[in-house]
Image: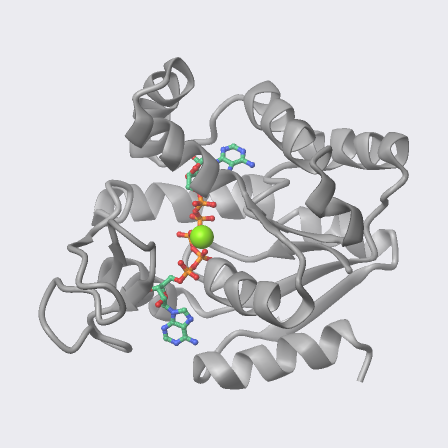
């Protein structure tokens, strides 16, 4: 399975990708996660990306394209991959197509997870993540048993720097202007599938799998 997950900030791309990894045994490539790790590690890339991410804007195309190309060349991608949060605009999508052609591993599907804006806001403001194992929670929908403590490993939970209300608004605007047009892009290629991302996480996962397996 060679897949792009499309969807607004907070649509549940990361949540569903984690479940797809388990079911299909293929890696998730999240440009957001790779960039946040670079920020946490204090690398030159992380230092340059942090301010842009905190403003809710997109980091330069060349930066993410190089990251993705390097990751796709690793052995575990030979059996498939899930691209999460990439591509983010038409220029990235076009370059990705050429890159995948060159690597002999073109996309089979682009799956769009559609969620109304009010739900997105609540999902993003309520999101908390474990510093240690990256398990995700939501204080409104799936809270940890003990405030700010991970149920799985006891690690401390944190809120992403870009999950502040002002930045969320900017991220949603950037999504509408730059990323939403990709639905048309993949629609024209005949590989777009769409599902409504409303309901429980498990209900949505069933819809995701049914769409991907053509059921
Ligand atoms: P990125 O990390 O990709 O963030 P995003 O696209 O804004 O998406 P999110 O990760 O916020 O949402 P998600 O869809 O993964 O939702 P999640 O599963 O976490 O990008 C961050 C930044 O990095 C960008 O702004 C940009 O600066 C930069 N960047 C990244 N890629 C780039 C690129 N290609 N080009 C340029 N710049 C790039 O779920 C959210 C919450 O909802 C969680 O709390 C979860 O528990 C909860 N939830 C999930 N499903 C449900 C449900 N069904 N019901 C209730 N709650 C739910
Ligand atoms: Mg994510």
Q: Position of residue 161 (x, y in %)?
A: 24, 41
User: In which quadrant is the C terminus drawn?
Assistant: bottom right
Please state if 171 lies on the left or on the right of 138 as rendered: right
Q: Position of residue 24 (x, y in %)?
A: 68, 67
Closer to us: 107 or 88 = 107
Please state if 157 lies on the left or on the right of 14 as rendered: left
Q: Is residue 158 above or below residue 64?
A: below
User: In which quadrant is the N terminus drawn?
Assistant: bottom right
Q: Is residue 214 above or below residue 160?
A: below
* Residue 109 quadrant: bottom right
Closer to us: 204 or 182 = 204
Q: Position of residue 57 (x, y in %)?
A: 41, 32
Please state if 187 lies on the left or on the right of 59 as rendered: right
Closer to us: 132 or 95 = 132
Q: Position of residue 188 (x, y in %)?
A: 85, 53
Q: Residue at x 33, y 61 (%)?
A: 135
* Residue 56 quadrant: top left
Q: Residue at x 52, y 74 (%)?
A: 197
- Outermost residue on the left side: it is 147
């Amino acid at each position: 399975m060679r897949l792009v997950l499309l969807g607004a900030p907070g649509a549940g791309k990361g949540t569903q990708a984690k479940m797809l990894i388990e079911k299909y045994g293929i890696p998730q490539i999240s440009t957001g996660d790779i960039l946040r790790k670079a920020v946490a590690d204090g690398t030159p890339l992380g230092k340059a990306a942090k301010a842009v991410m905190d403003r809710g804007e997109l980091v330069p195309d060349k930066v993410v394209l190089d990251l993705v190309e390097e990751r796709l060349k690793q052995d575990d991608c030979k059996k498939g991959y899930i691209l999460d949060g990439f591509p983010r605009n038409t220029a990235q999508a076009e370059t990705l197509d050429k890159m995948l052609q060159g690597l002999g591993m073109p996309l089979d599907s682009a799956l769009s997870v559609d969620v109304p804006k009010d739900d997105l806001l609540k999902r993003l403001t309520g999101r908390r993540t474990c510093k240690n194992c990256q398990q995700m929670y939501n204080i409104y929908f799936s809270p940890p048993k003990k405030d700010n403590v991970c149920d799985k490993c006891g690690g401390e939970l944190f809120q992403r720097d870009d999950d502040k209300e002002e930045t969320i608004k900017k991220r949603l605007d950037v999504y509408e202007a730059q990323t939403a047009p990709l639905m048309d892009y993949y629609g024209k290629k005949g590989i777009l599938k769409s599902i409504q991302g409303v309901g429980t996480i498990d209900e949505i996962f069933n819809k995701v799998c049914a769409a991907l397996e053509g059921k």
